[in-house]
Image: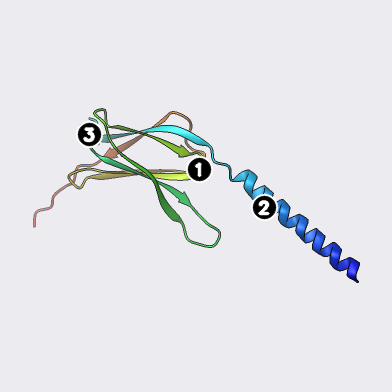
Amino acid sequence: MEMKIKNAFLSLSVILCFLLLNSCIFSKSEPINISVKVINSETKKPKVGDTVVVRKVEKPWYKMWQYIEVANGITDSLGTVYFTIDKTKGHTFVSYGPNSEYGSTEYDERELNENDEIIIEVNPKVRKRW
């Protein structure tokens, strides 16, 4: 009887160690460099001075989807910002302009590659008259 309990405990320990090791192996990050270009959708010209926010998308097994901010930056004179992100995660890219203009795009995990350029088209804010 005591031998069966020890064997069961040993088997359970081996399985837990295997699962822990397996999760560590498959959760390695793969950093890549990307650029995000923000353009005006009407004029197709680059937008200077917009803030670009990058959020990684995660789905823990015990919670709802999470959007965690990992980086932000301001576009240069070419409307471009450069980031290093994790290829193994999904990401959303949102651009906020100075005149309440915004645009966004989303990519799934492993969809982006090294030196990819992401283009966000920002629609100018339409003002309504009452």
The location of residue 13, given as percent across then percent down, is: 76, 58
- Taking 73 as reference, is 22 left or right? right
How far apart are the two marked residues, 2 and 3, measured between alpha carbons?
A: 47 Å
* Residue at x 72% of width, y 53% of height: 17
Secondary element at tag 1:
loop
Secondary element at tag 2:
helix
The residue indicated by pointer 3 is 48
Q: Quadrant of residue 35?
A: top left
Q: Residues within 10 Å of mark 1 (few under 14, many from 20)?
A: some
Of pointers 2 and 3, the one earlier in the residue sequence: 2
Secondary element at tag 3:
loop
Rendered position, 61 above or below 55: below
- Taking 101 as reference, is 18 left or right? right
The residue indicated by pointer 2 is 20
The residue indicated by pointer 1 is 109
Residue closest to the eye, 62 or 74: 74
Badge 1 amino acid: Glu
Of pointers 1 and 2, the one earlier in the residue sequence: 2
Badge 3 amino acid: Val
Quadrant in the picture for the C terminus? bottom left
Colouring scheme applied when the structure was drawn: rainbow
How far apart are the two marked residues, 1 and 3, measured between alpha carbons?
A: 29 Å
